[in-house]
Image (spheres, grey):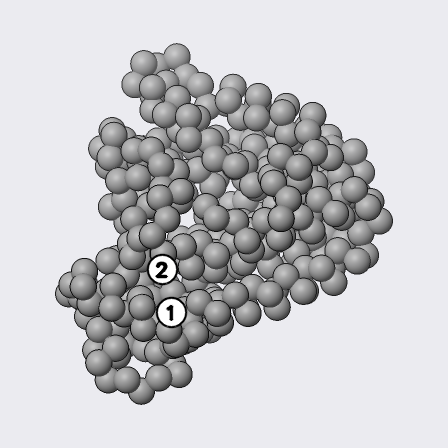
């Protein structure tokens, strides 16, 4: 599996400029806001979304100012959603560091999240293209709907795979989908190529969230969040959903009910996780990702820039196989 710095090599200069612009946007002369934004910058992460925007754009034409504004807008949107997610989930850690809500409190975390959303919309307006503004505005609606649906799933006695996919499509995949779509659109790609790039991004996003959910079944300090955290929050992800829908074991169905009610003990959750592993839950999740990966490879066959094609193939592999 290629490392991310190898994957981003074809857009090394463009990514460097994007990071520079990102740091500039996330600065403020106000002491408190400036301090919080500095904390957000310090946990920048891997810049996965800007990388996808830039690589996709470069497949069709040279990166331009519109592309940079799109990449910034989507990364700002992503970070705004993380701030709000951490408040909703009552998370104390993000990327191995204290979350903004843990360090500065829920009120400031929500306010700064709103500030980042406003910056994202401002960057989209700078493109001068209403389809971009509309798409990024739509993301806010879809992400919020995904969060509400996830809360509804916690209350439902049974969670289907379809309901799980609907949640992760809205919560995670739509943002990656927009990275592909708007990256292509920003450089004037044809409608057919924009559609392909949009689907490719969606596939990547689905894999990204499924892989993220798998992390929760293992003790891994690299990811910067506690193992079993999803179940502590009442969430049943794909491995659990698959096993429950293919098992009539009353004991573990009862534990699943307790998980959703928030009454499961740590020992019960640990026992449930081992049951899921032993009954093919993790293997099934990998099978689903492999099917998505095959579809992504098929789309990439139509890409003409071999360097970009190989980089995005590596990007897909990285998403599926990453360890954090």
Q: Identify whether 275 is placed above or below 223.
A: below
Going 28% across and 84% down the picture, which residue do you hit?
A: 249
Q: Few, some or many C-alpha atoms within 10 Å of disc 1 (few <14, some 14-19, many ≥20)?
A: some
Image coords of residue 92 (percent x, y): 26, 40
Which quarter of the picture shows residue 99? top left
Residue beneath the point at 57% across and 21% down: 20
Q: Is residue 145 left or right of residue 202?
A: left
Residue at coordinates 80% horizontally, 38% vertically from top-left? 61
Secondary structure under badge 2? loop
Label 1 SS:
helix
Q: Name the residue tied to disc 1.
A: 277
Residue 241 visible in the current orientation: no
Q: CA distance from mark 2 to mark 1?
A: 8 Å
Count the marks.
2
Label disc, if present, on residue 250 of the rendered structure = none
The one nearer the camera, 52 or 293, is: 293
Q: Earlier in the sequence, mark 2 or mark 1?
A: 2
Residue 234 x, y percent position in the rendering: 26, 62
State if disc 1 and disc 2 touch (CB < 8 Å).
yes
Percent across and percent down for residue 133 are 58, 41
Tell me the crowding category of disc 2: few under 14, some 14 to 19, or many 20 or more residues within 10 angstroms, Cα based: many
Question: Which residue is disc 2 drawn over?
Answer: 217
Whether residue 262 sits left or right of residue 91 in the image: it is left
x, y (%) of residue 33?
Answer: 34, 21
């Amino acid at each position: 599996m290629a490392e991310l710095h190898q994957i981003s090599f074809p857009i090394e200069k463009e990514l460097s400029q994007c990071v520079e612009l990102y740091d500039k946007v996330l600065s403020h002369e106000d002491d408190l806001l400036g301090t919080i934004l500095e904390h957000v910058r310090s946990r920048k992460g891997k810049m996965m979304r800007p990388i996808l925007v830039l690589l996709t754009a470069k497949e069709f034409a040279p990166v331009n100012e519109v592309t940079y504004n799109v990449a910034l807008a989507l990364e700002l949107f992503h970070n705004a959603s993380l701030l709000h997610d951490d408040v909703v989930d009552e998370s104390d850690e993000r990327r191995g560091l204290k979350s903004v809500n843990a360090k500065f409190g829920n009120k400031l975390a929500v306010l700064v999240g709103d500030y980042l959303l406003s910056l994202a919309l401002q960057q989209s307006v700078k493109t001068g293209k209403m389809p971009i503004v509309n798409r990024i505005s739509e993301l806010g609606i879809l992400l919020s709907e995904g969060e509400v649906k996830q809360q509804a799933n916690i209350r439902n006695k049974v969670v289907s795979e379809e309901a799980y996919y609907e949640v992760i499509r809205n919560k995670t995949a739509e943002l990656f989908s927009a990275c592909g779509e708007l990256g292509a659109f920003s450089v004037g790609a044809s409608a057919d190529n924009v559609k392909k790039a949009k689907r490719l991004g969606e596939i990547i996003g689905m894999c990204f969230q499924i892989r993220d959910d798998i992390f929760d079944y293992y003790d891994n300090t690299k990811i910067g969040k506690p193992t079993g955290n999803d179940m502590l929050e009442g969430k049943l992800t794909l491995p659990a959903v698959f096993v429950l829908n293919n098992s009539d074991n009353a004991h573990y169905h009862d534990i699943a009910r307790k998980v959703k009610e928030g009454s499961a003990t740590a020992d019960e959750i640990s026992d449930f996780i081992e049951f899921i592993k032993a009954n093919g839950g993790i293997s099934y999740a990998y099978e689903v990702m492999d099917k998505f990966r095959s579809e992504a490879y098929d789309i990439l066959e139509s890409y003409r820039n071999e360097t970009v094609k190989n980089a995005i193939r590596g990007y897909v592999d990285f998403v599926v196989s990453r360890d954090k």
